[in-house]
Amino acid sequence: MRGREWSRPVRPARREVLSAIPELEEGRPPLLFVPGFGHGAWAFAEHWLGHAASRGFPAYALSLRGHGASEPAPEATLRAYAHDVVQVAASLPRQAVLVGHGAGALVVAHALARYPARSAVLVAPVFGGWKVLGTALRRNPAGTLPAVFGGPLRLSRGQLFSREVPDEEARRYVGRLGRAGRRAQWSLLGEPEAEPAVGAPPVLVLGSPDDRVVPASTLTRVARRYGSAPLLFPGMGHDLMLDARWAEPIDAILDWLEKEPTAH
Amino acid sequence: MPTSTDHGRPDPEATSPAAHGDGRPVSDRGDTVCVIGAGASGLTAIKNLREHGFGVDCYERETGVGGAWNWRHDRSPVYASTHLISSKPFTQFPDFPMPDSWPDYPHHAQVLSYFERYADHFDLRSHIWFGTEVIRVEPAEGERWDVTTRSTGGYGPERTARYAAVVIANGHNWSPKLPRYEGLEEFRGEIMHASSYKDPAQLRGKRVLVVGAGNTGCDIAVEAAQQASRCWHSTRRGYWYAPKYVLGRPADQVNDTLLALRVPLRMRQWLYHWTLRLTVGDLTRFGLPKPDHRVYETHPIANSQLVYYVGHGGIGPVPDIARFHPYAVELTDGREIDPEVVIFATGYLPRFEFLDASVFADSAGAGRPTLWLNAFTPGHPTLAVAGLLQPDSGLFTLSHWQTVLFARLLRARRDRPDRAAAFAKRVRDRAGERYSGPVKDSSRHWFEVGHADYLRAIQRALIELEGK
């Protein structure tokens, strides 16, 4: 019984959805990319959307409310973000694969309890907790500390990208970062665990051992929760989709989707 | 469209023939489950059974999905202006929300498009045999079922296939229940059941009598108030007419806030009466009969416009009908009125003509099965009925959870037979349980459930089955 879903449904919001559709319909499942906090759909439009489409997968990316070109929503909660993902997933022509990055992976984990995805991919998942906060405080105290008190979370270039990304490009990306809702940010500290995924979809976890936001041990822990081991890409930063070697992880995801049987 | 070769259509020639009791060939469909009907409950049954790893053959007598909500279907009760009476969160499937851009109370055409999208999104159509009606469902050995089908309308040969389980989702709002009145046969005006009412043009410029104060009756009375030259609305008793919006929000959502807080029934009734006094006011002032019961004791009527049109003189409330005369209708208060059209919005009765009444322990054959959770039959652990509910909310969420429970039960029969046996015992012991407050024992309330109580009961059954 989900009393809150009935009595207090999430308020609708206008959402930005970017897409790249293959010219030929090959019967592949649509992918829905969910960016992490601060990022918008643009982060996937840069490289991954086009690449997925070129390999025959219809690819979509949304901006959670308050991010990118979606409607501003300073009071958004994790539940509202999960609602955004489920709404867009249900609007796609066929059962979708959800791909969440960073805190977007946490949003995807919550959305999976409300939408039977064909399968799911968690990229450098930020599931919150004190350990992640500790790492962030150590690496970037000035950017992290205000977030604890409801201010914006500012991620630095060093946290997000490897040294291979040209300076100018990295600065451009960091300049585009926005901020998540205050309440959503806080939920990274004390949010209850997501309900189990409906339809028991296969879940792939991947990330980088050199990620300066998500420690490798967290990757292992999240992957274990879904009964697998993480796929690792050494030498890459947290934003795998914008890093210099962005093609490797997306190719790995698409290879997995081609091989992996669907949820049924 | 799938063909008989690409999708394993039960074909007696192609599979090793088992023999039915009377020697008919039966194609064995193994672990496949048969779903009867591709309306709201049938679709969610297919989806959830597939999600739990079962093969499904669904038979649909019409040529499209949507059941009652597909106005092209000859059994559809919807009319041109039908809107949902429960708001979106109460109506949608819990794992496939209606779009944010839709209104709180969508139109029936939107509901149909929602089902079509649901069917396409989860690739359900390839499991549905359209234009095929089920004519017999008989128990077979090993708690399996022989299902006999043929083309809708009686064309073509009959085929029988044996299934591991059956979900009956044939709907219960298509077989009209017509009351008997003295002199009805002699009445010279037009008589129709609400199921035949499709368009306000049928009422335009006429003197119309609408009988029945269900949600349909009230909706049609409101339409008649706008189209007909005169409208009478006959009800046997007084009802509470709840507005669709309270405090600027859909009324059912406000009510569920109280349910979520577990406010006791008495308190909720008091609050409800108080809200109605503030919004609708004293109904007897409008000439409507005083309700003889408290709110929540009959099926809720959500209609913001009825009282408004009574207030404008568009609707004349009248009591029950005493008898019909050739050109007039006599009312129980002695008055006579002269309608040209009489519309009976008097509800429907469920029918399971393909099933022997003994399966449902329905000795009277009236269509009232004795079930647990309104879905499970004592003595038949592989048979379930989906959507046989009259909830105080939308139906689709409840059908969803019913079919999830049935899919989990079928899985438990394979993996945890002890749990499945315990479930079967509960079905035998608790068949006939009710999930609503005190309601009158008329056929209108046979399947009445309070959605919160009912969902909690399903949740308990799931936990008991899976031992969490």
Image (spheres, coloured by chain):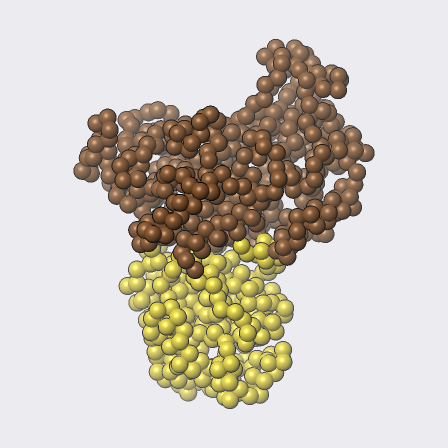
x, y percent for residue B143: 30, 39
Q: Measuring 58% from the left and 30% from the top, which residue is drawn there? A: B442
Q: Residue at x 75, y 17 (%)?
A: B334
- Please state if B79 lies on the left or on the right of B276 as rendered: left
Query: Which chain: brown?
Result: B
Q: Is residue B64 left or right of residue B413?
A: right
Image spot of residue B198 (x, y percent)? 57, 29
Quadrant where the C terminus of chain B is found in the figure: bottom left
Task: Name chain A's colour.
Answer: yellow
Q: Is residue B398 visible?
A: yes
What residue do we see at 81% from left, 34% from top? B285
Between residue B85 and residue B424, name the one nearer to us.
Answer: B424
The quarter of the picture where residue A46 lies is bottom left
**Residue A8 appears in which quarter of the rendering?**
bottom right
Front-most of residues B196 and B409: B409
Q: Position of residue B88 (x, y in %)?
A: 58, 49
In this rendering, does residue B352 appear at all? no
In the image, taking residue A100 as reference, residue A13 lies left or right, namely right
Where B356 sits versus A67, above or below? above
* Vertical relation: B192 (above or below) A46: above
Residue closer to the observer: A58 or B26:
B26
